[in-house]
Image: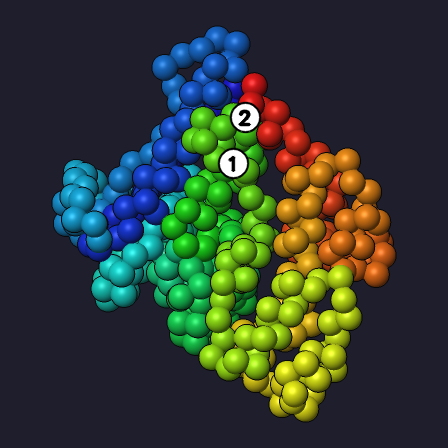
Amino acid sequence: MRQPHTIAVILFENLMPLDVVGPTDAFMVANYYWHREQTHPSDDQFYKYEFVSAAEETVTCLSGLKLHTSKTIANQSPDAFDTILVPGGNGVFTALENATLIEWLSMCRHKQRVMSVCSGSILLGEAGLLNGKTACSHWITCDYLRDHYPEVNVNPDALYMFDGNVITSAGVTAGIDMALAIIEKDLGYEIALATARRLVMHLKRNGNQSQFSWPMKMQYKPQSKRIQSVVHKILSELQTELGVDALAEHAGMSTRNFSRLFKQQIGETPAKFVEKSRLEYSRIVLEENQKASLQSIATVSGFSSGEQFSRSFERIYGLHPKDYSAQFKLQQESISS
């Protein structure tokens, strides 16, 4: 029987409440399934968490919800916990001025596992916990994280990132994805899957999956009508030639000027946008037609071969297309059972 794992959930004024209750509810559900598997069940839970305030015992969330705890960082040592959870929200920028909190977090540098949700990564950056590590955050705060903490390698597109003892996640609901990934790491795939099912999570998403789905990109409207026309062409003609020269010709611009303007307005190069769009579409095909061959999926998605498609898919999503399809099928069967 594994020993209980204690988690300190940090509270501060104007935090995002879902950043707190989303992950903690996932851990609560995981406790149920872990307890059910024990040979000699007891009242013990695997995850035990305490809400620890950065200052006052009562904090007001962004929504107006009030959270009360008798525990504060003044009377709780980081050494009493195995994991520290730091939420995000507008209050992060006020919490940055709390020198006691930053010092408290900095003491978690080696022993504890530290995880953040959304803009909570900024507090980890201020405490020096992200130096030399790769981290993510809500897309709105990625530039702030990169500009203020140059020693951090910021991944602006990931849902969550594991780097040593530090785990960071993107905005709000990505905190639940991160919690499920942690549950899988601690207690195994079956309990993580059962937890996702209980939470009515359609799919436990891979951390490398983009914060923006393919349909969301399809709704994106650049400032320039020429670039907007190119984006529409890419998303509606994935099987055609979409090299930068062909796209620049479609836009009626020089290749150099087109590439510069496209990256300025879209945030990535034309080639990267084409690749991600094709991969997002291939993922949808994999989910809807699990018997399709890799070559047929590659063809309808615009890749030159099944091998090129597989390499690209594994690089972006962290697993082979067949493994993704098998995982999706297993989860669908579990949800429908």
Colour scheme used in the picture?
A: rainbow
Residue lying farthest top? 40
Q: Residue at 56% of width from left, 44% of height from top?
A: 205
Q: Position of residue 33 (x, y in %)?
A: 47, 20
Q: Please, is residue 79 above or below residue 5 in the view?
A: below
Q: Mark 1: few, some, or many residues within 10 Å (few <14, many ≥20)?
A: few
Camera sees residue 73: no
Give the quadrant of the C terminus.
top right
Say which label, 1 or 2, has the lower sequence index. Answer: 1
Camera sees residue 26: yes
Q: Mark 2: few, some, or many residues within 10 Å (few <14, many ≥20)?
A: some
Q: Position of residue 163 (x, y in %)?
A: 56, 54
Amino acid marked by disc 1: His
Circle number at residue 40: none
* Residues at discs 1 and 2 in contact (Cβ within 8 Å): yes
In the picture provided, is 307 more to the left or to the right than 208?
A: right
Q: Nearer the viewer, residue 143 or 211?
A: 211
Task: For marks 1 and 2, give the CA distance.
Answer: 8 Å
| Label total for image | 2
Circle number at residue 202: 1
Q: Position of residue 211 (x, y in %)?
A: 51, 56
Q: Residue at 59% of width from left, 69% of height from top?
A: 232
In the picture provided, is 192 more to the left or to the right than 85?
A: right
Q: Position of residue 85 (x, y in %)?
A: 37, 46
In the picture provided, is 140 more to the left or to the right than 155?
A: left
Q: Residue at 64% of width from left, 47% of height from top?
A: 284
Amino acid marked by disc 2: Ile
User: For the residue labelled by badge 1, is the local secondary structure a helix, a strand or a loop?
Assistant: loop
Q: Nearer the viewer, residue 165 or 228?
A: 228
Q: Please, is residue 58 above or below residue 231 in the view?
A: above
User: What residue sits right under mark 2 in the picture?
Assistant: 335
